[in-house]
Amino acid sequence: MSSDTADLTKVDSAVSGLSSSPPKDEKRGHRRASSSAAGVYNINDLEKEGKELQIAKETQKLNWKLNTSPATLDEKEVLKKFLTNPPVKKIDLHFPLGLEVTARNMKGVTIKDALDAIHKQYKKKADDELELPVLAGFEWDKDESWTRLIVHQKKEGAPSTAGKKKNKKGADDE
């Protein structure tokens, strides 16, 4: 057996000019392509171009309590809509008392993303701790700040809760 091994020579895989690693002069890109979707803008780019934002009107009709999860809303389709037109990757939501939260989504900030960001700040608050517990809507004031929306709140959202009660009574009667 020792005579057989004497004839063997060490074999190097790189001898024939093949290499398992890529050549060093090749430039490699990022590991992963950007996860942002086409047509989704950076808010700062929109400001430079002077493009105006339109806010989804559906946010005014939600009557959503800030300390409840957005998943409890009845209108699930509304949550999937973009918060602004054109859609943006991130936007700051400014409350009148000074609190500011940021909603982010590389594929475009949706109404759900904005509500999630707000809920994260208010989920531990009791109803009686909040002076204005219901979302009234958002306002974009380009003169004050191009990159943020002002959050408007109200005391109560009675119309939608009254509608729910009527539906429940109708179900009990059947």
Image (tube, rainbow, N blue to C red):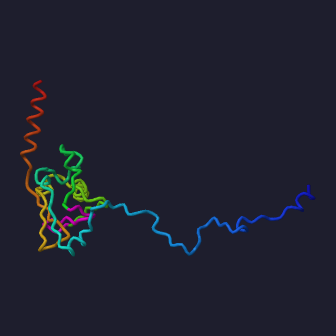
Furthest toward the front, the residue is: 16
In the image, residue 123 above or below residue 23:
above
| Residue at 14% in and 67% down | 97
| Residue at 21% in and 45% down | 76
Image quadrant assignment for residue 92: bottom left
In front: 130, or 19?
19
Which quadrant holds the C terminus? top left
Q: Is residue 96 magenta?
A: yes
Q: Is residue 75 visible?
A: yes
How many numbered discs? Answer: 0
In the image, residue 161 above or below residue 54:
above
| Residue at 13% in and 60% down | 138
Which quadrant holds the N terminus? bottom right
The span picked out in magenta is 86-99
Q: Is residue 124 visible?
A: no
Q: Tell whether 170 sits left or right of 36.
A: left
Image quadrant assignment for residue 99: bottom left
